[in-house]
Image (cartoon, rainbow, N blue to C red):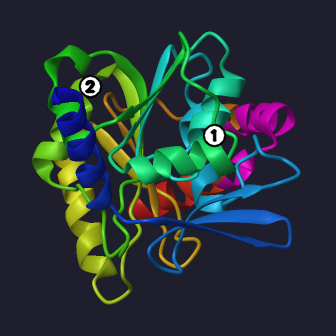
Amino acid sequence: MKQAINLYRAQQRAQTHPEVSISEFIGVRNLHLSSDAIQGSMRLAMPDQIELEYVQQMMMWLLFKKDPRHIAQLGLGAAALTKCCYRQFPTAKVTAIELNPHVIQACYDYFKLPANDERLQVIEMDAMDFVTDERHHGTLDILQVDLYDAAAEAPALGSPAFYQACADCLTEDGMLTVNLFGNPDNYEANCTANLEALEAAFDAVVWLPMVHDANTVAIAFKQSPSVDFDALYERATEIRLTMKLPAAKWVNGLKAWMQGAD
């Protein structure tokens, strides 16, 4: 009887989350949550490559760190970041936190997400609960945040308390990347509020030019880095050759931001 009750509760919990739908167009498979908005994509011919430009930008921490030991992702999407980090860093631990069980199952069924093992853990959990758990504090080298509900009006979590908890999870030289997508009607206000909350929790925050209909990706540093653009361009070339990511564009964006901030 107890097993039956637990199963019913699990099913009831799952029904409170948006349903997932899948579409395909010209060789690209897309994940949707109860709307036409694309929440993640995978090119069928290259399932381990990151398809969307803003998701590629979430990897710009690569310019500053080559050998992370523990990478975490808040919000699974179509598992592009999780798969990339798992494949590219064979000695690193990779953790993905996703609240919606439909998304997790869709990633297994349609987006070639590997099963959990000693390095990879995909966990059905609220992101706020994860970052406020003191057992995770000081344990992450990299934290990638892409948290949206089905409406995708604004980041699902973006308070000062949330970003401070994210900072607490990072090691001393840890970095966070975050996608600040939002509804065009309130995008500027939401983006500004999130950036102010990030700046209160981190030593330095920089963001790239907007792409893909109001996706702005920011990088936040636990400790402000020393920036040598010649070295960053050299590193960008390495990233392009080894991971097929357009890292020079990230350096261009960071350089433009810093020149504009002077």
Q: Is 192 located above or below residue 134 in the figure?
A: below
Across and down, in percent, residue 105 comes to 52, 45
Q: Label the magenta part by its dominant secondary structure.
A: helix
Across and down, in percent, residue 172 comes to 31, 18
**Mark 2, residue position:** 169
Which disc number belongs to residue 108? Answer: none
Residue 87 located left or right of residue 148: right
Q: Is residue 262 visible?
A: no
Residue 88 located left or right of residue 171: right
Across and down, in percent, residue 202 comes to 25, 38
**Mark 1, residue position:** 229
Q: Quadrant of the C terminus?
A: bottom left
Q: Residue at x 47, y 55 (%)?
A: 258
For the magenta stretch, what is the residue range?
A: 232-249
Quadrant of the image occupied by residue 162: top left
Residue 163 located left or right of residue 48: left
Q: Quadrant of the N terminus?
A: top left
The answer to whether the residues at label 1 and label 2 have Cβ atoms under 8 Å apart is: no
In the image, residue 177 lies in the stretch drawn in magenta: no
Near-viewer residue (67 or 131) = 131
Quadrant of the image occupied by residue 171: top left
Q: What amino acid is labelled 1 in the image?
A: Phe
- Of helix, strand and loop, which one carries label 2? helix
Quadrant of the image occupied by residue 234: top right
**Label 1, label 2: how many angstroms apart (C-alpha)?**
28 Å
Q: Residue at x 58, y 73 (%)?
A: 212
Mark 1 or 2: the one toward you: 2
Near-viewer residue (228 or 143) = 143
